[in-house]
């Protein structure tokens, strides 16, 4: 299985800025030996679909409603994202959890909406600095996996990605050690095995996110059991992101 490199633009880049970015990026990663996904703001999805047409790059969104349809002003449904051209969708990002008080139960409903519409969820999980400092990392990750994946069938997980993002490493410049990342990967796969099967625990993609740069990408990708990277700030420059993809 190829490594997966995911760009998360967060609330950056207009539609036209996305066009300029993708036109610059595509030639730089033309010979990449990895799978690539670009998660853009809702307003850039149409442009992303146009620019990524006839390329293997996956177009992604950064959020989805937990509801199928109805009186939910400002929300965007999974069916809408599917029709707009998205293939993958971020759910449970720590910024959504912190700034918008999203719970594991809500994230679980979002995952089910995505799977019902044949979209691949990228589930973000991870602990805060306080939780790590008080030895609660294992407890937190176990709970997130148990609740976020509740009620799913084993065959549904083949289209999912789990992103381990320790919250204390996101945008801080602090990066988890190789051992911390390796331990988290093993824990995630163990929990998947407990709730589903050993087979799916080996097959599901697990990626890492948190203060990733071209300078540390190669070392991170060498970690056993890690299937890729979720890149935030460093994905905003086409050249910088291409260096991570080509690491």
Image (cartoon, grey):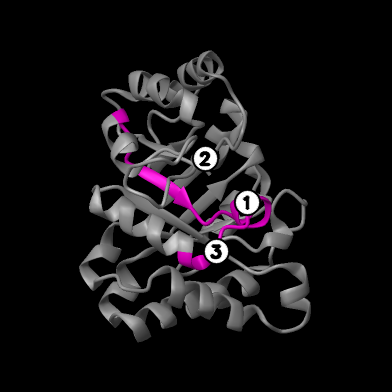
Q: Residue at x 55, y 75 (%)?
A: 141
Residue 220 to residue 231: above or below: below
Which residue corresponds to mark 2? 7
Q: Quadrant of the N terminus?
A: bottom left
Tell me if 127 is positioned left or right of 39 in this view. right
Which stretch appears magenta?
84-105
At which x and y percent is residue 126? 60, 66
State how far apart marks 2 and 3 are (Cα). 24 Å
- Please identify the residue farthest to the left as the structure is shown: 155
- Disc number placed over residue 100 in the picture, else none: 1
Element under disc 2 = strand
Specify whether residue 204 is painted magenta. Answer: no
Asked whether the beta carbons under mark 1 and mark 2 sit within 8 Å of each other, the answer is: no
Dot in front, 2 or 3: 3
State how far apart marks 1 and 2 are (Cα). 21 Å
Dot in front, 1 or 2: 1
Element under disc 3 = loop
At which x and y percent is residue 114? 32, 51
Residue 23 to residue 125: above or below: above
- Disc number placed over residue 103 in the picture, else none: 3
Camera-side residue: 9 or 198?
9
Q: Residue at x 78, y 78 (%)?
A: 133
At which x and y percent is residue 181? 59, 69
At which x and y percent is residue 57? 35, 34
Specify whether residue 100 is painted magenta. Answer: yes
Looking at the image, is mark 1 or mark 2 earlier in the sequence?
2
Camera-side residue: 98 or 196?
98
């Amino acid at each position: 299985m190829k490594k997966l490199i995911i760009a998360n633009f967060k609330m950056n880049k207009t539609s036209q800025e996305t066009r300029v970015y993708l036109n610059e990026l595509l030639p730089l990663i033309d010979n990449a030996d990895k799978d690539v996904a670009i998660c853009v703001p809702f307003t850039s999805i149409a442009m992303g679909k146009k620019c990524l047409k006839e390329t293997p790059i996956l177009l992604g969104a950064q959020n989805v409603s937990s509801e199928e349809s109805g009186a939910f002003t400002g929300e965007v449904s999974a069916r809408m994202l599917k029709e707009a051209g998205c293939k993958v969708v971020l759910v449970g990002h720590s910024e959504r959890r912190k700034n918008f008080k999203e719970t594991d139960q809500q994230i679980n409903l979002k995952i089910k909406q995505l799977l019902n519409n044949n979209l691949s969820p990228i589930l973000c999980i991870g602990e805060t600095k306080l939780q790590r400092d008080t030895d609660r990392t294992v407890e937190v990750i176990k709970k997130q996996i148990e609740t976020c994946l509740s009620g799913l069938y084993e065959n549904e997980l083949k289209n999912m990605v789990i992103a381990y993002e320790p919250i204390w490493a996101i945008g801080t410049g602090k990066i988890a050690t190789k051992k911390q990342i390796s331990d988290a990967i093993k824990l995630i796969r163990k929990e998947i095995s407990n709730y589903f099967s050993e087979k799916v625990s080996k097959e599901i993609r697990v990626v890492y996110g948190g203060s990733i740069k071209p300078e540390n990408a190669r070392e991170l990708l060498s970690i056993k059991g890690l299937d890729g990277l979720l890149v935030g700030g460093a994905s905003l420059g086409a050249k910088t992101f291409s260096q991570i993809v080509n690491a």
